[in-house]
Amino acid sequence: MQGATAVKKSLIALILSLTTLSAYAQNDLTVSDLATNKETKDTFKKMVGKHPLPRWVTQGGTSSRNQQVEIGDKKFMVLNACKPHDCAAQNIAVLYSPESKKMAGVFSTVDEKAFSQTLIWLNIDDDLSIDGKTVLFAALTGSLDNHPDKFNFQ
């Protein structure tokens, strides 16, 4: 009987450590990880579609801290990255749901000489049309970092 109790305790400890490791891994997840990880790269390719993105997106841009948001009844991670050494020129923000494997994003290019910004919306479906775009744009502008509780849409 004592052997069964020890096995149960070991299993509980293993599950707790895996849960902690999983949460840690999600906080450290980057846009380039989504693009290259075997579990997410097909979803990332689907999100990008036929839009050409610069190489830094998949090979390691400068990443910001991930945020968590709720849109409807789904929880999403918000990942943000920018062009190394030129964050003002190019940025990408991605909504990713590890549970549903859903991914959507926006890629931004700023032309300082023309005083213009071009946004390319990636895989925005009807479920994410307004609230998803709001969260993604807030991630690009820094509003999500400054006011994280204001971007949960339930």
Image (tube, grey):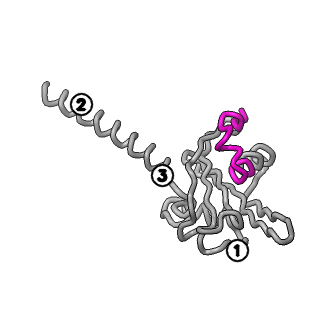
Mark 2, residue position: 9
Front residue of 153 and 150: 150
Q: Are marks 2 and 1 in contact (CB under 8 Å)?
A: no
User: Where is residue 81 shown, x and y percent of the image?
Assistant: 61, 59
Q: What residue type is labelled 2?
A: Lys
- For label 2, the SS is helix
Tell me the distance, in whole angstroms, between the alpha carbons under discs 3 and 2.
Answer: 29 Å
Picture disc at residue 137: none
Front residue of 129 and 83: 83
31 sits to left or right of 126: left
Q: Are marks 3 and 2 in contact (CB under 8 Å)?
A: no
Q: What stretch is highlighted in magenta?
A: 137-154
User: Where is residue 30 shown, x and y percent of the image?
Assistant: 53, 57
Q: Which of marks 3 and 2 is in front?
A: 3
Q: What residue type is labelled 3?
A: Asp
Q: Which amino acid does label 1 sit on?
A: Pro
Q: Please give the name of the residue rendered at 68% of the width and 37% of the height, measured from the top-left corner.
A: 147
* Magenta span contains residue 91: no
Q: Can residue 72 be seen in this view?
A: no
Mark 3, residue position: 28
Tell me the distance, in whole angstroms, between the alpha carbons under discs 3 and 1.
Answer: 25 Å
Mark 1, residue position: 52
Is residue 139 shown above or below 33? above
Q: Please give the name of the residue rendered at 80% of the width and 68% of the height, measured from the top-left corner.
A: 112
